[in-house]
Image (tube, helix red, strand yellow):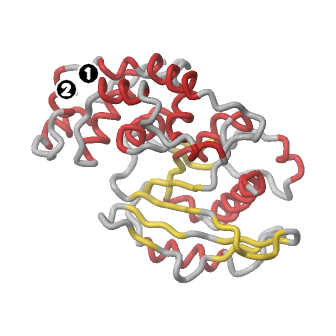
Amino acid sequence: MIAENEIVLTYLLQLMAERGILDKLAFKGGTCLRKMFIGSGGRFSTDLDFTRVEEHDHEDVVLDMMEACEHPFHGIQFDIPGDSYYETQDGLSWGVNPTYAHDWNPSGQSEIRLQVSRRKVPTLPPLRMAQSPQSYFQHLPFDPADIMCLALPEIIAEKIRACYRRAKARDVYDLSEFAMRPLDRPLIRRLVVLKLWQASDGFDPKGLLAKFNDPTAFDWDDLRQLVRRTQVIDHAQITAACQTGLAFLVELDPAEAALAADPHQRDYASWRMLRNNLPISSD
């Protein structure tokens, strides 16, 4: 069912792209990493996560989605249940839980979680990208649409923020896929500090690295259903990759360290200065 869901997500992305719904949103999160950067080597996911790229009325977007789901799309009937719309308590995110049905899964009980963050517009310019090719693409009745995504450094920074604030092993797994690859490390470190400050949180990079060393810090059952049954989940290898590959986070410059120690958002001027002077690599 998870594998089926992976393919259905491709159909839903296509439907939303063809209807222009994705023009207001930037794709991000674990599903984005798999579909846009890793391909079949990444874990499965049942979520679609986006950030707004421009101000919009979320009720209009939901209505557009409901209209798009009125008719079957290449044999799949999507639906937006009227009671599935929600807003987070802080009002900074909203979402819906589309269901789907098709010939060999007609129940309509299969569910996708779609969430849109309106905390801030992207820090880096989003990029419109082709989806990473997968073997089943040749059987699709359409050419998968290009999707506007957060830039990879910003996606990784948001994953680090998630690891810092919660205990889902899927976040650690996603980071381990990139931790040892060439990355724009100064930019990612700056983005982590900025994003945690926006979330009214400080940043203790040594505490995060210590968290990777704690075998009880993450819910590893959270990950089991998202990888192939034959795949061995080596907790130690995954966390070791993160500890080594993310050690650069402790190298905060004085301005970053000061903002990391300001969880109550008192120093907006410093946040704005750091945001306006991002250490973007010329590579």
- The residue carrying mark 1 is 252
Q: Position of residue 278 (x, y in %)?
A: 31, 29
Residue that appears at 51% across and 31% down:
175
Quarter where residue 170 is shown: top right
In the image, is residue 222 above or below residue 99? above
Other-residue count near label 2 (Cα within 10 Å), few / some / many at <14 / 14–19 / ≥20: some
Q: Position of residue 51 (x, y in %)?
A: 45, 54
Other-residue count near label 1 (Cα within 10 Å), few / some / many at <14 / 14–19 / ≥20: some
- The residue carrying mark 2 is 257
Among numbered discs 1 and 2, the one appearing first in the sequence: 1
Mark 1 and mark 2 residues within 8 Å of each other at the beta carbon: yes
Q: For the residue labelled by badge 1, is the local secondary structure a helix, a strand or a loop?
A: loop
In the image, is residue 138 above or below residue 113? above
Query: Which labelled disc corresponds to residue 219?
Result: none
Q: Position of residue 277 (x, y in %)?
A: 26, 29
Quarter where residue 30 is shown: top right
Q: For the residue labelled by badge 2, is the local secondary structure a helix, a strand or a loop?
A: helix
Residue that appears at 73% across and 33% down:
231
Q: Amino acid under label 1?
A: Leu
Nearer to the camera, 137 or 82: 82
Quarter where residue 187 is shown: top left
Alpha carbon separation for disc pair 1 and 2: 6 Å
Q: Position of residue 128 (x, y in %)?
A: 58, 44
In the picture, measured across the screen, residue 151 lies left or right of residue 143, that is: left
Residue that appears at 66% across and 40% down:
43
Nearer to the camera, 122 or 223: 223
Q: Residue furthest front?
A: 216
